[in-house]
Image (cartoon, grey):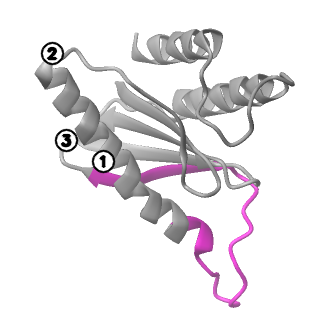
């Protein structure tokens, strides 16, 4: 189950971060803060993965944007996706055995397309946090489809 989805800009600035927990009140705030910390901590792993050099000494130039499983943190697993423009999408999932990677790839790709469509609006600010109810609802729909 996806408990957090994040879009991080090329300078590691958070552009969109949404959590999906059942907690309420103070527990929800604590859970949100914890998930924000997990997302921030996993950015180092993304940098290591994309900066890795092959046996020839050349940088890894894989065309697959899906980074796969980045790291386990407590009872969560972090998965990543990075575009050629260094836009990073991270998903924090509960650590269970039934993580469906092909479906997760589809979620990442769809959220990436939603973000591109959001940016195509001439009134959308570049490199600023996403403030669109339509975008948020579209992402929520993707996450709910994966979680069901």
Count of numbered badges drawn on the protein:
3
The segment highlighted magenta reads 49-72
Residue 104's place in the image compared with 136, above or below, is below
Callout in the foreground (2, 1):
2
**Which residue is depicted at the point 66% across and 48% down?**
87
Q: Is residue 91 found inside the magenta-colored segment of the image? A: no
Residue 138's place in the image compared with 56, above or below, is above
Badge 2: few (under 14), some or many (20 or more) residues near its Cα, within 10 Å? Answer: few
Residue 98's place in the image compared with 145, above or below, is below
**Which residue is depicted at the point 51% across and 60% down?**
46
When asked about the image quadrant of residue 134, the answer is top right
Which label number is shown at residue 25?
A: 2
**Residue on which the image places disc 3:** 75
**Where residue 22 sits: x, y (%)?**
22, 14
Sequence-wise, the earlier of marks 1 and 3 is 1
Callout in the foreground (1, 3):
1
């Amino acid at each position: 189950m996806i408990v957090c989805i994040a879009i991080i800009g090329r300078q590691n600035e958070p552009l969109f971060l949404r959590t999906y927990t059942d907690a309420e009140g103070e527990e929800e705030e604590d859970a949100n803060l914890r998930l924000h910390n997990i997302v921030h901590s996993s950015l180092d792993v993304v940098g290591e993965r994309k900066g890795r050099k092959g046996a020839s000494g050349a940088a890894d130039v894989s065309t697959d944007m899906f980074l796969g499983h980045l790291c386990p943190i407590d009872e969560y697993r972090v998965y990543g996706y990075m575009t050629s423009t260094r836009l990073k999408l991270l998903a924090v999932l509960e650590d269970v055995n039934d993580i469906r990677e092909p479906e997760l790839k589809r979620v990442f790709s769809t959220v990436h397309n939603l973000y591109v469509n959001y940016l195509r609006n001439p009134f959308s600010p570049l490199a600023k946090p996403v403030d669109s109810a339509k975008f948020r609802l579209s992402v929520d729909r993707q996450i709910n489809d994966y979680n069901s």
